[in-house]
Image (cartoon, helix red, strand yellow):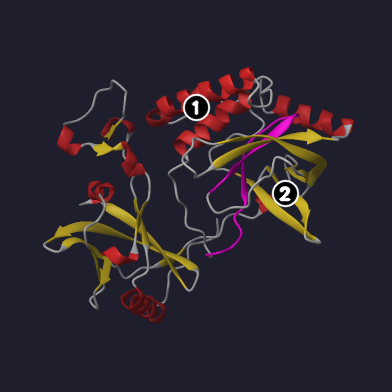
Amino acid sequence: MTEEKELTKIERELVLQYLIDDNVPLTVTLEEKPEKADAELAGEKTSLPEKESRLPASAVFPVAIPSEQITVLSQGIILLKNPARTVRPFIGKQVRVQFYFNRLGLYFLTEMKECSKGLAIVIPSAIRRLPEPASGPGYALSGAVSYESANARISISCIPLPGYRLLESPKWTDIPEACRSHAKALLESFVQESRSGRAEPAGNGLHLLAVARCLASEQNTHESEPVEGRAKPFYLIFADDKRIVLALKSGSEKIDLDLSYDLSLDFALPGNRLFKRTVRTGCQAETVYSDGSGGMQCVSLKYTGLQEEDRRFLCEQVKGSGAA
């Protein structure tokens, strides 16, 4: 990521006045995530601290605050009126507050406090810009999905979702403990759909573990983009010599099961990431996976027309990564 640039004093004053005048919606996130033993894990039997000191597992997720619940005072204090119950675990803790100013993503760190009028957030002197994500060539594997639409060529970049080891066998231990019960139910459902013929054959099914992990642990997350309204990329969560699996966040383009797509995969060569090998092939969506919430989806795409030389290269990449 690029350096997070702090606003100048004049820029901060403009942003403060903007917040006062426009009552923009905010996203609040706990800056220091609770340790596993400090969070309530639904359905898990584990040693927990005293109840009043626990944090619910949901506290690791950002909370959106609508503009109608926000009042910004000229002193640089944000008052939250009738906040959602999910915000209360943040009281007395350091939080990250994110918002958009003229489509530019900004954030600041502060402490959420309780007051007679509800909850209060003091805007600190330092307001920073959200960092830009690393560019494609910085990834060991990246790519793009493209197709023709209304006489135009549409191309959507594909970048790895942080924490997912592409070209390696997913492991159950990769899934956060608080999400494993949900992930297990999803995995069993996807396997049953494949076996019953309601979904395409899943092969060895390794990619389903990545799908279950993604839908169980990423579904409620919300990351502000550095620039509002910019096209969202697809996120790679699994790749081998037969298919890739993409995570599609809310608001991104959709993958149509009835369409064929062109796929390019860029592999950075070991020792020098300025040099890369590109594999180009057609692909067809096999199955769209969701947990029924209407949010994030995962889509598996099977390669079509892959050249034998490229298939051998992909097999070598999977083997070289230690995949089973």
Alpha-carbon span between mark 2 and mark 1: 28 Å
Q: Is residue 4 left or right of residue 148?
A: left
Instruction: Tell me, for residue 144, which label it has, or none.
Output: 2
Q: Is residue 149 left or right of residue 211?
A: right
Q: Is residue 33 visible?
A: no
Regarding mark 2 in the picture, which secondary structure is present there? strand
Q: Is residue 299 visible?
A: yes
Q: Position of residue 127 (x, y in %)?
A: 38, 68
Q: From this viewpoint, which residue is outermost toward the left?
A: 116
Quadrant for residue 132, please give it.
bottom right
Mark closer to the chain start, 2 or 1: 2
Q: Callout 1: 10 Å neighbours few (<14), some, many (20+)?
A: many
Q: Position of residue 119 (x, y in %)?
A: 20, 59
Quadrant for residue 237, please give it.
top right
Check the image and report above or below for 109 versus 213: below
Q: Residue at x 28, y 38 (%)?
A: 56
> What residue sits right under mark 1 in the picture?
186
Asked if the magenta segment contains residue 69, the reply would be no
- Between 290 and 324, the one nearer to me in the picture: 290
Q: Position of residue 1 (x, y in %)?
A: 55, 55
Q: Position of residue 39 (x, y in %)?
A: 29, 34
Quadrant for residue 50, please give it.
top left
Q: Residue at x 43, y 28 (%)?
A: 182
Q: Which residues are magenta?
A: 228-249
Q: Is residue 236 left or right of residue 7?
A: right
Q: Identify the amino acid type marked 1.
A: Leu
- Between 160 and 61, the one nearer to me in the picture: 61
Question: What is the count of numbered marks?
Answer: 2
